[in-house]
Image (tube, helix red, strand yellow):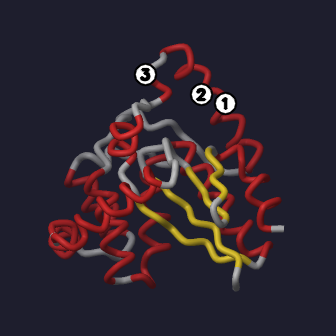
C-alpha cells in the first residue's frame, strides 16, 4: 500500500470523532493506509493563535446543530459531552504510548476513548471514569498510568504536536495525503479525491 492518510487528531474534538467514523472505511475503499498521529490540540492552538470554535458563542451553538446533522448523514451515534472541555493530555499521551508499545491495541484504545467522549458521553477527565472505560476495553489502569508517565511517551506527543504545527496544522481533525493538508471532518471527500 503506497497511499497513506496521516490523521492528526485529539480526542477532545467532536468533529475529529466524526472524521474517525469515516476514515477507516475510506482508507479501505481507496486501498490506503490510515496512520494515526496523536497530537495535543491545546498545544496546536497555543502555537498557532487558534482557539476552539466554542469560544465564539454563536459559532458554538451553530456547531452543536451542525455536528448532529453530520452524525445523521454518516449514520453514527453522537452526543455532545456535557463535561466539555476535558483536559485530553492523559488521553493523548495514552494514544502515543499505546501506539509505541502496543500498536496492535491502538484501534481498540481509540475506539474506546472516542465512544466514551462522544457517544456515551463520559467525564474522561475523572481518573475513576477513565479507569473504568479503559478497564472495559481491556487496559489495566496502573499500567496505563505508568505508560503515560514514561518520558519517551511524553516526548513523542510533544514531537507529534510540533511536527503538526510545522506542517501547517492549526486544528483538528487534520489529514494529510502526501503534502496536502485537509482540515475538518467535512473534507473527507477531498481526502478521497486526493487518494484517487
Query: Image height check: is 115 above or below 122?
Result: below
Q: Residue at x 35, y 75 (%)?
A: 98
Rendering coords of residue 62 (x, y %)? 61, 21
Q: CA distance from mark 1 to mark 2?
A: 5 Å
Instruction: State the SS at label 1.
Output: helix
Query: Image height check: is 170 above or below 20?
Result: above
Query: Image height check: is 178 above or below 143?
Result: above
- Side of 15 where 82 appears, left or right: left
Residue marked by disc 3:
55
Identify the mark nearer the N-term, 1 or 3.
3
Cβ–Cβ under 8 Å for marks 1 and 2: yes
Instruction: State the SS at label 3.
Output: helix
Front residue of 101/179: it is 179
Rendering coords of residue 196 (x, y %)? 84, 68
Q: CA distance from mark 2 to mark 3?
A: 11 Å
- Outermost residue, top direction? 58
Picture quadrant where residue 149 is located: bottom left
Q: Residue at x 21, y 66 (%)?
A: 148
Instruction: State the SS at label 2.
Output: helix
User: What's the mark number on residue 63?
Assistant: 2
Cβ–Cβ under 8 Å for marks 1 and 3: no
Amino acid at each position: 500500500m503506497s497511499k497513506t492518510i496521516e490523521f492528526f487528531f485529539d480526542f477532545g474534538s467532536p468533529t475529529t470523532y466524526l472524521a474517525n467514523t469515516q476514515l477507516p472505511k475510506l482508507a479501505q475503499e481507496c486501498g490506503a493506509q490510515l496512520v494515526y498521529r496523536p497530537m495535543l490540540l491545546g498545544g496546536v492552538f497555543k502555537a498557532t493563535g487558534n482557539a476552539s470554535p466554542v469560544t465564539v458563542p454563536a459559532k458554538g451553538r451553530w456547531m452543536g446543530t451542525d455536528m448532529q446533522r453530520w452524525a445523521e448523514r454518516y449514520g453514527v451515534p453522537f452526543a455532545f459531552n456535557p463535561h466539555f472541555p476535558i483536559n485530553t493530555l492523559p488521553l493523548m499521551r495514552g494514544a502515543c504510548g499505546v501506539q509505541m508499545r502496543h500498536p496492535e491495541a491502538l484501534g481498540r484504545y481509540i475506539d474506546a476513548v472516542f465512544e466514551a467522549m462522544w457517544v456515551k458521553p463520559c467525564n474522561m477527565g475523572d481518573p475513576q471514569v477513565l479507569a473504568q472505560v479503559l478497564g472495559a476495553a481491556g487496559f489495566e489502569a496502573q499500567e496505563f498510568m505508568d505508560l503515560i508517565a514514561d518520558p519517551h511517551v511524553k516526548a513523542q506527543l510533544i514531537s507529534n504536536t510540533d511536527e503538526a504545527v510545522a506542517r501547517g496544522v492549526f486544528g483538528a481533525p487534520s489529514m494529510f495525503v502526501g503534502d496536502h493538508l485537509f482540515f475538518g471532518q467535512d473534507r473527507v471527500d477531498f481526502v478521497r479525491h486526493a487518494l484517487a
